[in-house]
């Protein structure tokens, strides 16, 4: 397919989406592909642009829905702060659901991320962050049990491990994050109500204390369209 017909397809899809009320389901892929005169593979490729903008959402086993305008968290990355703090500053309402707190043991990945031996006792906290009632991010924090155990968390735990540690008085120094794009694995796609292999933005982060020890190893999966992250940088030696 040449570039011009593909652009025309995206234009037609944009009109269809804009004319569809938020919350309404689009035609299923075979029918929509026939209506647009393209293959299902080409249709999926064109629709991915609108998914990353947060304009449509595919739900496993249900279909593709128009979601309308979504609240956006716009934040710089120069200072580490929780998503709760960012949202409050912007007067956005967010909520936590699907909270799971469990005891586990370090596998190769978490052992490397935390700098501990495999088999070390850990606490893992998983939850979904919702914006305007819709899943927007899936957050996973893993900490050594020597730092945090499930019974340390209060019954009204709001979902932010960073805010909990700061409020407890833990001496934290710096955070390091690797930012990349990834395809949603099945265990992340399901709570986010998206399709497996949909593109997500992922932050893989380590939080260090004053001694340089890793106190938290986290993976945060973000649905594009709900978040605008930016970095302010100096020019040269100015």
Image (tube, grey):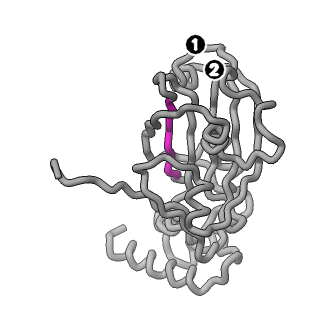
- Which image quadrant for residue 17? bottom right
State yes or no: residue 149 in magenta: no
Tell me the SS state at disc 2.
loop
126 in relation to 17, above or below:
above
Q: Residue at x 69, y 63 (%)?
A: 134
Identify the residue under disc 2: 106
Give the farthest residue toward the left. 237
Q: Say left or right for 84 vs 76.
A: right
State yes or no: residue 203 in magenta: yes
Q: Residue at x 63, y 48 (%)?
A: 138
70 in relation to 221, above or below:
below
Circle nearer the N terminus (1, 2): 2
188 in relation to 18, above or below:
above
Q: Position of residue 219 (x, y in %)?
A: 56, 39
Q: Which portion, as a residue range, is magenta?
A: 200-208
Tell me the SS state at disc 1.
loop
Task: Classify mark 2: residues with Cα within 10 Å, few (<14), some (14-19) or many (20+).
Answer: many
Identify the residue under disc 1: 117
76 in relation to 63, above or below:
above
Q: Residue at x 53, y 46 (%)?
A: 183
Q: Residue at x 24, y 53 (%)?
A: 234
- Please identify the dominant SS of the magenta region: strand
Give the farthest residue toward the right. 155
């Amino acid at each position: 397919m040449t570039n011009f017909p593909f652009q025309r397809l995206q234009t037609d899809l944009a009109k269809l989406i804009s004319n569809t009320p938020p919350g309404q389901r689009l035609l299923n892929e075979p029918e929509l592909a026939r209506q647009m005169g393209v293959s299902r593979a080409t249709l999926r490729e064109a629709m991915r642009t609108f998914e990353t903008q947060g304009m449509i959402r595919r739900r496993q086993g249900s279909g593709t829905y128009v979601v309308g305008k979504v609240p956006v968290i716009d934040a710089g990355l120069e200072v580490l702060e929780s998503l709760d703090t960012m949202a409050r500053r912007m007067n956005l309402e967010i909520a936590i659901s699907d909270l799971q707190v469990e005891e586990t043991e370090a596998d190769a990945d978490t052992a490397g991320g935390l700098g501990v031996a495999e088999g070390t006792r850990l606490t893992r906290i998983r939850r979904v962050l919702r914006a305007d009632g819709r899943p927007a991010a899936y957050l996973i924090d893993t900490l050594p049990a020597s730092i945090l155990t499930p019974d340390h968390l209060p019954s009204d735990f709001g979902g932010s491990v960073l805010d909990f540690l700061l409020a407890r008085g833990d001496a934290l120094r710096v955070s390091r994050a690797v930012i990349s794009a990834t395809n949603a694995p099945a265990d992340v796609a399901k709570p986010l109500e998206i399709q497996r292999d949909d593109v997500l933005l992922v932050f893989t982060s380590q939080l260090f204390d004053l001694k340089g020890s890793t106190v938290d190893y986290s993976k945060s999966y973000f649905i594009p369209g709900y978040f605008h992250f930016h970095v302010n940088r100096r020019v040269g030696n100015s």
